[in-house]
Amino acid sequence: MPKKRDGFEEFLIKEYENIAAAHFESQKQFALFFRYYTLFFSIPIILVGLTDINDLTHKWALFLGFLMTVLSIIGFFFYLYTIDLKNESILYARTVNGLRNYYYSLVPKSIIDKVIVLPIDRSKPKYFNPLSPVYVIIKIVNSVFLGTGLYLIIGELSLCLILSSIVFFGLHVGWNYIKCQKQEASYGTSID
């Protein structure tokens, strides 16, 4: 006959179900937000595609340059929001791992070794992952938009323009690192 669960175990099971659902929902929101980002940033690309580059007037180039520069800055804030969404998802995943670890600790290791188990390490996944494909795409698009926008405004390619795009890319990476370090410090993995 199965052992009757106490109130705490009932709570943990409910918590596991809720956190697992929240994790999948946050992943879904992250994917949806990225779709909106790609839609939003396709507008200037469509405008450029509809424009005959040989007939690009100075006013149109300035407008397009200003639009792309502003969009790159808005894109940076999009990026910050995606970091928050991803960090929330990672927090949920770590919580599920901790709850899973609790229940695995109640079962003999010989049984656990016979089945494929999901992660139980509360320090994984890592918050900071600068090579996440979505992050890389956003960083590149934002940086290219900034460089292209400034080029269209200034009218000539210079080392300063190239460096501004590189620095902007680095700003994305640095801000991601800072936000992830703050998240790790706030939620970490300590049980105390």
Image (spheres, rainbow, N blue to C red):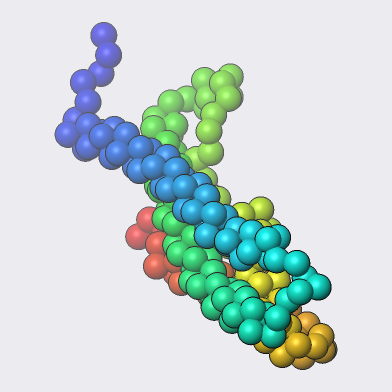
Question: What residue do we see at 49% from left, 66% from top?
Answer: 78
Rendering quarter of residue 166: bottom right
In this picture, is 147 found above or below 43? below
Q: Position of residue 57 (x, y in %)?
A: 70, 81
Vertical comparison of 113 with 71: above or below: above
Q: Is residue 154 visible?
A: yes
Q: Is residue 137 left or right of residue 88?
A: right
Residue in the foreground of this view, choosing between 5 and 182: 182
Residue 48 pos. (x, y %): 68, 65
Q: Residue furthest front?
A: 55
Q: How many marks?
A: 0
Please name whichever residue, 83 or 36, is drawn nearer the observer in this view of the structure.
36
Q: Is residue 47 left or right of residue 35?
A: right
Q: Residue at x 52, y 20 (%)?
A: 111
| Rendered residue at 53%/66% (across/down) | 79
Image coords of residue 76 (percent x, y): 54, 72
On the question of residue 87 being in view, the answer is no
- Residue under the point 53% across and 33% down: 118
Question: Quarter of the image containing the N terminus?
Answer: top left
Q: Quadrant of the C terminus?
A: bottom left
From the viewer's perspective, is 190 left or right of 11?
right
Q: Residue 22: image x %, image y %?
A: 35, 43
